[in-house]
Amino acid sequence: MNTMESLQGSFLLATPQMPDPRFREQVVYLCSHDESGAMGLVVNQPSIYSLAEICKGAHIEIGEGDWPFVYLGGPVEAEVGFFLYSDDYVLENSMAVGKGVRLSRDPQILHDIANGLGPQHYLFLLGYAGWAPGQLEAELGVNGWLILPAEKSILFETPDQEKWQKAALQFGIDIALFSDQIGAA
């Protein structure tokens, strides 16, 4: 890329200046970013459905217990599922997207999770957020997003309602007060 290096593996935090109301107080984990555009997953918007319901719908037997919620990963292709997970789990059909984080659409992960063999940490998301070439850079130019290094603990271990503020606070930023300063930590 000519003007900006790749932001893959970063968090995008929607600022109060975000013009698109669908992304209000959202945290996006950026999975790809290059000259052809960008793709990310909203990681703090759980749906009302659990992963157990996805397993049952796919005729995968599961055990009893608490199953995590399915996340609404973004407005594009909302019927397509993605796994964002810790790299302690190895799967051939996956890609590294950040430090210690991998991405896959392989349904084998669902089978392995149901059998207790999946990754230690994971999110299952439906849909994604996508940007055409130059679109994300334009949104950054009007302070729609704050770019921060992604942290696995925020991604996988922080309660969803705290991710937006906690991701910014770890860099001393009160995102609710973020205004006219362009920033990347």
Image (cartoon, grey):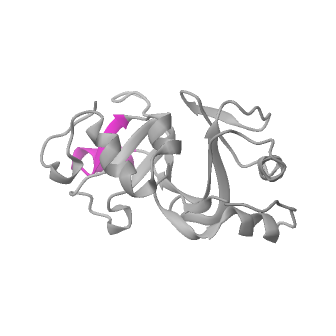
Rendered location of residue 108, percent (x, y): 82, 48
Q: Nearer the viewer, residue 83 or 169?
A: 169
Q: Is residue 34 visible?
A: no
Vertical side of 67 occupied by 185: above or below: above
Q: Is residue 183 left or right of residue 48?
A: left
Q: How many marks?
A: 0
Query: Which quarter shows the N terminus?
Result: top left
User: Which residue is at 51% across, 60% downward?
Assistant: 74
Q: Position of residue 119 (x, y in %)?
A: 71, 39
Q: Quadrant of residue 56?
A: bottom right
Instruction: Tell me which corner region of the image, top left, top right, bottom left or bottom right, holds residue 66.
Output: bottom right
Q: Residue at x 19, y 39 (%)?
A: 182
Percent across and percent down for residue 2 are 38, 27
Q: Is residue 32 above or below residue 15?
A: above
Q: Is residue 113 or residue 142 the one in the foreground?
A: 113
Q: Residue at x 49, y 52 (%)?
A: 43
Picture coordinates of residue 73, whole percent (x, y): 53, 58
Q: Nearer the viewer, residue 162 or 144?
A: 162
- The residues colored magenta run 134-148
Residue 139 inside the magenta-drawn segment: yes
